[in-house]
């Protein structure tokens, strides 16, 4: 089968790889119908050391079940399913607590011999705990929005929960990528009164406004902090969603949180340390977040997608086929595209 393999920074190839297949009785085999490129994929695209063997890629996909192992009970052949960006058994202590990204028997796509989502098929370990059956077919018009439930919409929602977004609150979203835009959707969905988007790309800002952003800050660093404080009577935001992961974005997020506020961090960290610890300590600012347990959120977000109450699939502004994936990486890295969807 054909799949995406990264061989180093800027070196993405579509290659023949071993066919996905059932290995364990708890596996399912899924033919991929839709997948996408994630902002976190751009870190290795910029930094990965050259590799002869390469690294399989992709952790967001929707597909159709082609085969199931003998012990699989909740999905059947022919089901259209969405897979969260981490696979999990659904039964360990952490899964039961809604933290499937810490599953004792789970793992990550495209790692340790597991297929990546940017390929024609995927072996899905722990299928019963991982896959969510969708009540629509693979060609449904809602596929783009349903695909976001695998990661970016769930991650934006996770950031909003970690930042304690709620009715009447002022929310600031740091980052105008797909996760930040979904964070705007999540904040509005949870009842935020005011949503400040920090970004400067005109097309992304326009979409953020359509999703519910009420204010825009295009500055960076100290200027951004000053501007947000001007917009909030000098106090800062109750809830801050950090959706980038760069040191400057983290510093900005901490700098614009009001005393007693909360910061939800979901941008993949690019630095080992968090600065401003004295300020956040004395201001009683809470810092939470991490990789979103998407599996815990999919079923709660699904009805709003199906009913058209939210449209996170609008973050996809380019659709390609599998052979065009290398150019899709380039387009996202060059900020020509917000998020690229792969249509099989």
Image: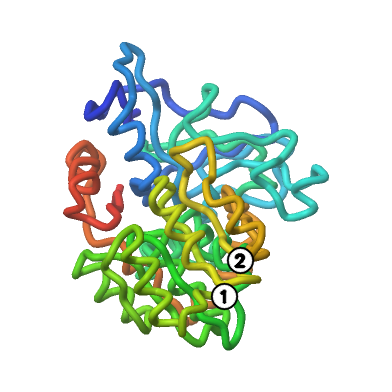
Location of residue 234 in the rendering, given as x and y in whole percent from the top left corner:
47, 79
Answer few, some or many: residues within 10 Å of disc 1's Cα (few below 14, many 20 plus, some between 14 and 19): many
Location of residue 8 in the rendering, given as x and y in whole percent from the top left corner:
29, 22
- Element on which disc 2 rests: strand
Quadrant of the frame with the N terminus: top left
Reading the image, the residue beneath label 2 is: 262
In this rendering, the answer to whether 69 lies above or below 293 is above
Q: Are marks 2 and 1 in contact (CB under 8 Å)?
A: yes
Q: Residue furthest right?
A: 93
Question: Residue at 37% of width from left, 51% of height from top?
Answer: 34
Question: Residue at 46% of width from left, 50% of height from top?
Answer: 267
In the displayed structure image, the side of residue 50 where residue 253 appears, left or right? right
Question: Residue at 22% of width from left, 57% of height from top?
Answer: 318
In the displayed structure image, the side of residue 260 where residue 271 appears, left or right? left
Reading the image, the residue beneath label 1 is: 238
Image-quadrant location for residue 208:
bottom left
């Amino acid at each position: 089968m054909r799949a995406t393999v990264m061989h180093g920074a800027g070196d993405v190839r579509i290659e023949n790889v071993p066919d996905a297949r059932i290995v364990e009785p708890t596996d399912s085999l899924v033919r991929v119908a839709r997948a996408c490129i994630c902002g976190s994929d751009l870190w290795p695209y910029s930094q990965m050391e050259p590799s002869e063997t390469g690294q399989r890629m992709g952790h967001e996909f929707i597909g159709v079940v082609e085969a199931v192992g003998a012990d699989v009970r909740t999905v059947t052949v022919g089901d259209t399913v969405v897979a969260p960006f981490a696979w999990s058994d659904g039964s360990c202590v952490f899964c039961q607590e809604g933290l499937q990204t810490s599953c004792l028997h789970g793992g990550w796509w495209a790692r340790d011999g597991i297929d990546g989502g940017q390929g024609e098929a995927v072996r899905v370990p722990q299928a019963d705990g991982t896959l969510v059956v969708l009540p629509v077919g693979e060609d449904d018009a809602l596929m783009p929005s349903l695909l976001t439930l695998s990661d970016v919409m769930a991650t934006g929602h996770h950031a909003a929960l970690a930042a304690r977004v709620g009715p009447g609150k002022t929310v600031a979203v740091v980052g105008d990528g797909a996760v930040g835009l979904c964070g705007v959707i999540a904040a509005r969905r949870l009842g935020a009164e005011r949503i400040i988007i920090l970004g400067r790309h005109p097309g992304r800002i326009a979409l953020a406004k359509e999703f519910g952003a009420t204010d825009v800050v295009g500055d960076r660093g100290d200027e951004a902090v000053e501007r947000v404080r001007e917009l909030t009577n000098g106090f800062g935001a109750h809830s801050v969603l950090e959706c980038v992961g760069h040191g400057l974005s983290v510093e900005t997020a901490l700098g614009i949180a009001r005393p007693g506020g909360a910061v939800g961090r979901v941008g993949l960290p690019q630095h080992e340390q968090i600065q401003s610890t004295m300020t956040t300590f004395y201001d009683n600012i809470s810092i939470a977040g991490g990789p979103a347990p998407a599996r815990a959120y999919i079923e709660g977000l699904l009805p709003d997608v199906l009913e058209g109450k939210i449209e996170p699939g609008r973050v996809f502004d380019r659709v390609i086929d599998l052979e065009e994936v290398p150019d899709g990486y380039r387009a996202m890295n060059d900020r020509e595209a917000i998020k690229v969807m792969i249509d099989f």
